[in-house]
Image (tube, rainbow, N blue to C red):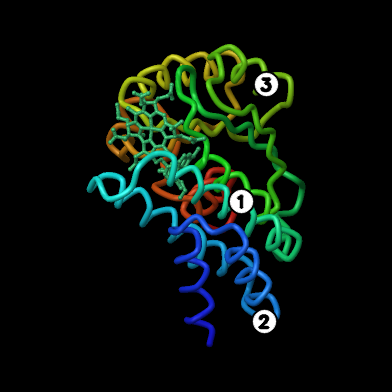
Amino acid sequence: MKDEILRGLTDSVVSGDVEKCVEYAKKALEAGIDAYQAIMEGCARGMSIVSEKYEKGEMYVPEILCSAEAMYAAMDVLRPHLKAESIGTPRKVVLGVVRGDIHDIGKNLVKLMMEAAGFQVIDLGRDVPNEKFVDAAVREGADIVGLSALMTTSMVVMPEVIKEIKKRSPKTMTMVGGGPLSPELAKVYGADGYAKDASQAVKVAKSLIGGVA
Ligand code: B1M
């Protein structure tokens, strides 16, 4: 039953069926499936399959955007049921997609998971100018700045942003993520952390603020 519902969620994200996705999200809650599990093992898994299918030429951009809509619709149903974790004093994360890059589906997933884990997320959106990250880090006294990039052409601005944050807000930790990034590259860029997906992003953020990883 549980597997069937999670598979239903995954399949309806892949097929971009908003109504079915909402239906399965409701079914998941009725069946007592944890909202976090439904998002990660249902919705997020669906988006991973979609990305793979795109790479293989089995899906095209308009279909991917429908999948994202379906995922967002399910997330709207599930979000209020996420068990808000307590991480003591609320910690601030400034999050955004770097300059020149408008891919924000993954960043939105990272935001949701971080909020569910008790972080206060200041979402700067996508195609964010370097100085906006730095200004927000200083203004908000951010514990962490999270930078997302999906393109090899956009990720190159990350070291510039990180360097400026270290200069103007030395206590702020930085973390990076997105398709073309890797742990090695994150080190080269001077980031304090790297995460390959949304659930790992939460673990890394917690370890950066000295919490339980
Ligand atoms: Co474009 N795109 N796209 N695209 N797109 C990619 C990224 C690409 C790899 C496709 C390809 O050619 N194989 C390629 C980049 C190649 C490169 O590296 N240079 C590409 C390109 C070239 C482009 C355009 C230039 C195409 C064009 O116009 N000629 C253009 C660029 C526009 C721009 O940004 N200036 C473009 C446009 C678009 C759309 C607008 C149509 C759409 C984006 C819609 C949107 O986001 N609102 C789009 C999409 C959907 C994709 C693919 C197909 C899917 C991305 C996605 O949403 N995946 C992508 C191919 C692919 O990835 N296989 C592709 C699902 C999402 C859940 O996963 O984003 O990886 P992901 O996020 C994960 C992790 O990466 C991680 O956690 C997330 C959740 O688990 N993560 C973090 C992400 N950020 C993190 C931050 C963290 C930690 C973890 O800490 C801070």
Q: Height in image: 133 above or below 143?
A: above
**Mark 1 — residue?**
72
Q: Amino acid at mark 1?
A: Tyr
Q: Amino acid at mark 2?
A: Gly
Determine whether label 1 and label 2 are within 8 Å by CB. no
Q: Nearer the viewer, residue 131 or 86?
A: 131
Reading the chain from its start, which is encountered first: label 3 or label 1? Answer: 1
Tell me the SS state at disc 3. Answer: helix
**Mark 2 — residue?**
32
Alpha-carbon distance for marks 3 and 1?
Answer: 26 Å
**Mark 3 — residue?**
136
Q: Position of residue 195 (x, y in %)?
A: 42, 45
Q: Nearer the viewer, mark 1 or mark 2?
A: 1
Q: Residue at x 54, y 34 (%)?
A: 146
Q: Residue at x 73, y 26 (%)?
A: 140
Alpha-carbon distance for marks 3 and 2?
Answer: 39 Å
Q: Residue at x 47, y 32 (%)?
A: 103
